[in-house]
Image (spheres, grey):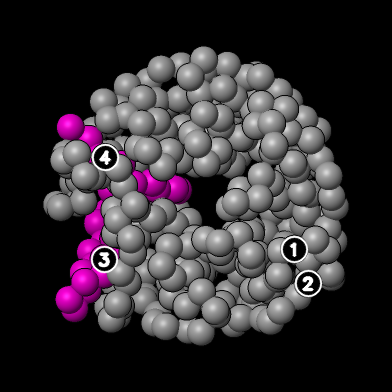
């Protein structure tokens, strides 16, 4: 088992978890796609404490801000599974997708947005009813997406190596509609994320080592570039901006203004990232490990082998 060699000096995150305040055991929910399972990994010991069967090829997992629901996207099966928290009980598996990939809960947790790459659709699921309420064509290859905080918008990257971004209006969360198209200005875009205030958008690429930071007001304006390691990179925001470079095996921590704060070594293949409860989670697709990083006095880190392949991770609290 590979262990990280560098410890972050400071990785403090706001706790941000309603469930943590109510007590319970913090866990990482991790998709083990070759085992067709969702794993619950105890964050104290690093041991797998629950294993929930999933439809074939579970790739991405998300939880709500209120920690009352989770969703798992199974790409090969063309299915999305809704689970209730904190019991981690499967409520319903919704099928009929061509090639679903990325999911995001609306800020209020009432809706789940899923990109269906195969059909170029944004699919809207009413979480309480566990039912699809809208399928909107947005662009061929629709993949990564991110809600823009405070602006009733979701931005969608049109592929894993994309030349276009679509902006969707979400004033009516059940009936979003497309409003803007944005070219990626020569680069092949991979992922995007917004600063907590929604004013800046960070765009990563599949063909370059930099991230472009935009003023997100329409039309978006390039502000500056950040050196972020081997592509593709993924970004998540807490008190800092956390950027993974899975091919490099590095997690870079930036200030919200783009200044490099620290760098940690992670197992190769640690592409995705999850935040919550004051911790950073990054699973390795190629090594099957989960790495946990925590802020505080001196910092904290461990890496555990949990599966043949670990794709994505999200924070939750179980009773």
Residue at label 2? 221
Front position among marks 2 and 1: 1
Front position among marks 3 and 4: 4
Mark 1 packing: few (<14 Cα in 10 Å), some, or many (20+)?
few
Q: Answer with left or right where residue 196 lies relative to residue 63.
A: right
Answer above or below: position of 131 versus 196: above
Q: Earlier in the sequence, mark 3 or mark 4?
A: 4
**Observer-nearest of 21 and 104:** 21
Residue at label 1? 217
Based on the picture, tell me whether residue 170 belongs to the magenta stretch: no
Q: What mark, if any, has residue 229 been given in the picture?
A: none
Cα distance, mark 3 to mark 4?
A: 18 Å
Q: Which quadrant is the C terminus positioned in?
A: top left
Answer above or below: position of 51 versus 165: above
- Residue 217 percent across, percent down from the top left: 75, 63
Question: Which type of secondary structure does the marked residue at label 2 adopt?
Answer: strand
Mark 4 packing: few (<14 Cα in 10 Å), some, or many (20+)?
many
Residue at label 4? 19
Task: Confirm or deny contact between disc 4 and disc 1 (CB under 8 A).
Answer: no
Residue at the spot x=78%, y=66% of the render? Answer: 220
Q: Earlier in the sequence, mark 4 or mark 1?
A: 4
Cα distance, mark 3 to mark 2?
A: 34 Å
- Residue 307 percent across, percent down from the top left: 32, 45
Task: Confirm or deny contact between disc 3 and disc 2 (CB under 8 A).
Answer: no
Residue at label 3? 294
Query: Which residue range is magenta in the image?
Result: 290-319
Q: Earlier in the sequence, mark 4 or mark 2?
A: 4
Cα distance, mark 3 to mark 1?
A: 33 Å
Q: Earlier in the sequence, mark 3 or mark 1?
A: 1
Residue at the spot x=26%, y=25% of the render? Answer: 87
Cα distance, mark 4 to mark 2?
A: 38 Å
């Amino acid at each position: 088992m590979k262990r990280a060699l560098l410890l972050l000096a400071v990785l403090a995150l706001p706790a941000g978890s309603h469930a943590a305040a109510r007590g319970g055991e913090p866990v990482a929910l991790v998709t083990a796609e070759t085992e067709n399972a969702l794993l619950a990994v105890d964050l104290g010991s690093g041991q797998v404490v629950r294993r929930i069967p999933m439809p074939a090829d579970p790739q991405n997992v998300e939880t709500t801000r209120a920690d009352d629901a989770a969703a798992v996207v199974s790409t090969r099966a063309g299915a999305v599974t809704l689970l209730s928290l904190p019991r981690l009980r499967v409520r319903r598996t919704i099928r009929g997708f061509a090639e679903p990939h990325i999911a995001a809960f609306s800020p209020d947790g009432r809706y789940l947005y899923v990109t269906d790459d195969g059909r170029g659709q944004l699919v809207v699921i009413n979480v309480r009813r566990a039912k699809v309420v809208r399928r909107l064509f947005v662009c061929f290859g629709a993949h990564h997406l991110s809600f823009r905080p405070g602006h009733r918008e979701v931005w969608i990257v049109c592929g894993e190596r994309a030349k276009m971004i679509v902006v969707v209006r979400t004033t009516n969360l059940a009936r979003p509609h497309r409003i803007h198209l944005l070219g990626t200005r020569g680069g092949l875009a991979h992922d995007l994320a917004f600063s907590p205030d929604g004013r800046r958008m960070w765009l990563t690429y599949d063909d370059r080592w930099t991230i472009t930071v935009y003023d997100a007001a329409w039309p978006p304006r390039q502000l500056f570039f950040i050196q972020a390691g081997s592509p593709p990179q993924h970004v998540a925001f807490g008190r800092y901006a956390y950027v993974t470079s899975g091919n490099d095996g590095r997690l870079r921590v930036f200030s919200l203004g783009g200044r490099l704060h620290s760098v940690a070594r992670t197992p190769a293949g640690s592409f995705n990232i999850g935040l919550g409860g004051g911790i950073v989670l990054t699973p390795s697709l190629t090594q099957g490990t989960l790495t946990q990083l925590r802020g505080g006095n001196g910092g904290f880190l461990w890496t555990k082998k949990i599966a043949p392949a670990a794709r994505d991770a999200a924070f939750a609290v179980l009773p």
